[in-house]
Image: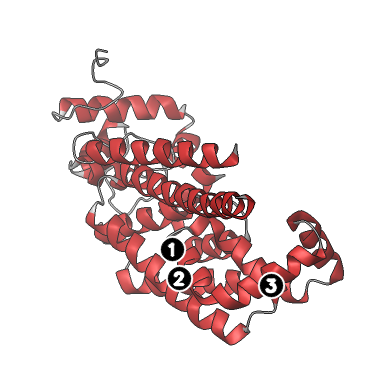
Amino acid sequence: MGEQILALLSQYGSPVLFAAVLVASVGVPLPITLLLVVTGSLVSQGAMRFWAVVVLAVAGSVIGDQIGYAIGRWGGAKLVTRFSAFLGGPARLDQVEAKARHYGAPGVFFSRWLVSPLGPWVNLATGIAGYSWLHFLVWDVLGESLDAFIFVALGRTFSDRVLELDAVTGNVTWTLVALLVTVLLGWKLFSYVRKKS
Amino acid sequence: MAFVVAIAGTFVFGFRAGRYARHLRWENEPIRPWMSVPFIAHTHHVPPDVLFRAIGLPPYEHDRRPMRAIARAEHRPVDELVRDIEKALADAGHTHPSLAPPKGP
């Protein structure tokens, strides 16, 4: 599916970019970083305009994120029950809701561009937690703007090395995700050991 | 256990990121069926008309069809078109990953 989207982007440009970032933000697994980097390369080749594609990419991803948030917030009791079962029960859901309210801003902002694989989950979780929609929107627009700017600019700079660049950025992102998980689990383990002793 | 997996993941992905970053300026971009002829020409620094002629098409820089769509329209296997492009690049003096001799251990 990724190759087909890239082929369509090559041929039709902006409308494909807009549609792809929108559905990926809702949670459909698409190679969005590669798509943005290839878009940057197309900008460098004169086939697309830099600011136009940045604005379009931001608009598409923000709309997709709002859909994810809305599903979480107004998706109904069934979704909340399923999500709370996934987390370990209603009590655990209350804890997650409190944390989402407390860490909502950095959570939304960094999951747009630095640890983007977590983005769709954060949309859903902040919606379920009832995090302020206005705050979500502001941090979402800021994060997505940075994401689109960084990757389109990188693609424009390294326009003749898009696949290698995508391999680097993809592995850096997963390194950060793994590091984040390591720190969280390490902290939990440390707290548990300290409590026991 | 999850903690150990997370540490291992950090090192594996970090190592891979470093390896790809080292190759960023040294290897030519591989050719994929989603790429258009002008895109391949740009990534290999050759004029597009050289590649259009190599696959038997009239040079037209606004033809942004991917290789796969060209293959379908021309009733030719996409691998054959990719081979023709690679040969034209090699003739133009470019070393392509799939044409380069295998690296030693």
**Whole-percent x, y for residue B52 in the image:** 28, 39
Q: Would you place residue A37 above or below residue A137 in this image? A: above
Mark 3–mark 2 distance (CA, rounded to whole Å): 23 Å
Task: Chain letter for mark 2, please.
Answer: A
Q: Along the polypeptide, which appears first: circle 2 or circle 1?
A: 1
The reply to whether discs 1 and 3 touch (Cβ–Cβ < 8 Å) is no
Q: Are marks 1 and 3 on the same chain?
A: yes
Query: Element at badge 2?
Result: helix
**Residue plotted at (62% across, 71% down):** A99
Say left or right for B41 vs A137.
Answer: left
Mark 2–mark 1 distance (CA, rounded to whole Å): 7 Å
Say what amino acid the circle numbered 2 marks. Glu
Furthest toward the front, the residue is A197
Task: Chain letter for mark 1, please.
Answer: A
**Residue plotted at (50% across, 66% down):** A18
The reply to whether discs 2 and 1 touch (Cβ–Cβ < 8 Å) is yes
Tell me the crowding category of disc 2: few under 14, some 14 to 19, or many 20 or more residues within 10 angstroms, Cα based: many
Q: Which residue is mark 3?
A: A97
Q: Would you place residue A1 above or below residue B71 in this image? A: below
Q: Would you place residue B57 above or below residue A34 in this image? A: above
Say what amino acid the circle numbered 3 marks. Glu
Tell me the crowding category of disc 1: few under 14, some 14 to 19, or many 20 or more residues within 10 angstroms, Cα based: many
Q: Along the polypeptide, which appears first: circle 1 or circle 3?
A: 3
Furthest toward the top, the residue is B104
Task: Chain letter for mark 3, please.
Answer: A
